[in-house]
Amino acid sequence: MITTTRKSLIALAFCGLIGPVSAQMPAPVVATETAQLRMLAPTVELPGTVVSRNDARLASELAAKLEWIAEVGTEVSAGDTVARMENVTFRLRQKEAEARVMREEARVVFLRSERSRLEKLSESNLSAKSQLDQVVSELAVAESEEAIARAQLGLSQVEMYVTEIRAPFDGVVTERLRNVGERLNVADELIRVVDPGSLEIIARAPMGTVNFIAEDDVLEIHNDYRQGEAAVRTIVPFGNPQSHMFEVRLDADPELWTVGENVRLSMPTAEEKEVLAVPRDALILRREGASVFKVLADNTVEQVRVITGLGAGSHIEVIGDLAPGDQIVVRGAERLSSGTAVSVSNLATTGTGNALN
């Protein structure tokens, strides 16, 4: 019975009474970007280093023994104590200075009172006038001694204050250069604080390129792990006579880069010119040459041979049967050939990367 039914179904299929067994394969999905006229210039890749604009090695301002120091990795705010010196000697000096100020103040108060009393008596008493002259002289000396005592008190207060080493800005402790118990001299470095939120990239470029960049120009930056852009903040146009290089500093995004990273930046070596450019991801590189896939009006693709020219960052100049506005496949071209029907998903360019719509 089962065999008879199966034979009947096969016969019906051959007769066209049962539809096709399998549906047509769906069109491959590709991502595209628009070929555009862009201002590009030839570039050279240069090495750079990400550094913090706020990077301080803090030193002792006194000769004293180190009592405490913050751990590496500690996050600190400006004004936070990151190290402390033994302060017993300096505290005693401050108390001695305070006592001397009190003594000199009392002496000045007494002599001023005597001066007032003798001034009244000297109007009718010659002896009192002679005593007044003596008191006035002693008062001048006492006021001078009081000023010296106050200065010494201020100095002792400063010494007490600098027994604590404080962070000059918000940051992170990255190095402990001395250990607790060590005797330090004036200017001995003991701790390093770095601000990871204020970064810049330092690079050195050939003197021949100095005329092709300006402050606020945006350059492509990348390394083996990520890529992005950075604006030129400062150009030092005075080159090193030995290396014939000049220094460039660029603002770095702390969300993208970290202190100490090595990067490479694309530095223009000539004036920009307008060219037709496509994303580098669109290029198909074969032995016979480079090509791209262009999406036609009927949603089929055509493989177009191109010659590449100037490149800058993620885009490159192409010369071939292309025009501004053409939709170029940048993802999903691996199995395409001319005439293949595709389903298109446009790419939207956002900042340093692309995202599918």
Image (spheres, rainbow, N blue to C red):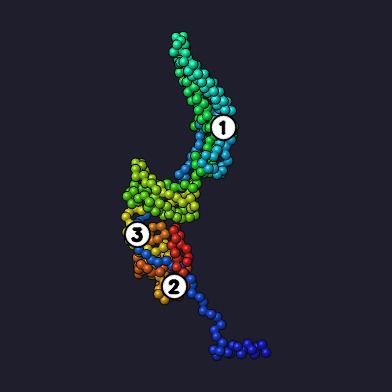
> Height in image: 119 above or below 178?
above
Give the mark nearer the N terminus: 2 vs 3: 3
Q: Residue at x 55, y 44 (%)?
A: 75
> Height in image: 275 above or below 155?
below
Nearer to the camera, 63 or 270:
63
Per the image, the residue denoted by label 3 is 39
Determine if residue 169 is in view.
yes
Q: Residue at x 46, y 55 (%)?
A: 227
Per the image, the residue denoted by label 2 is 337
Per the image, the residue denoted by label 1 is 85
User: Could you tell me residue 52's position as x and y percent?
Assistant: 47, 45
| Residue farthest toward the right in the current orientation of the protein | 1
Q: Are marks 3 and 1 in contact (CB under 8 Å)?
A: no
> Height in image: 72 above or below 319?
above
Q: Residue at x 52, y 22 (%)?
A: 105
SS category of the residue bearing label 1:
strand
User: Could you tell me residue 101's position as x and y percent?
Assistant: 52, 23
Which amino acid type is marked by label 1? Met
Q: Which numbered mark, 2 or 1, is in the foreground of this view?
A: 1
Give the mark nearer the N terminus: 3 vs 1: 3
Residue 247: numbered disc: none
User: Could you tell me residue 67's position as x and y percent?
Assistant: 59, 33
The quarter of the image holding the N terminus is bottom right
Which amino acid type is marked by label 3? Met
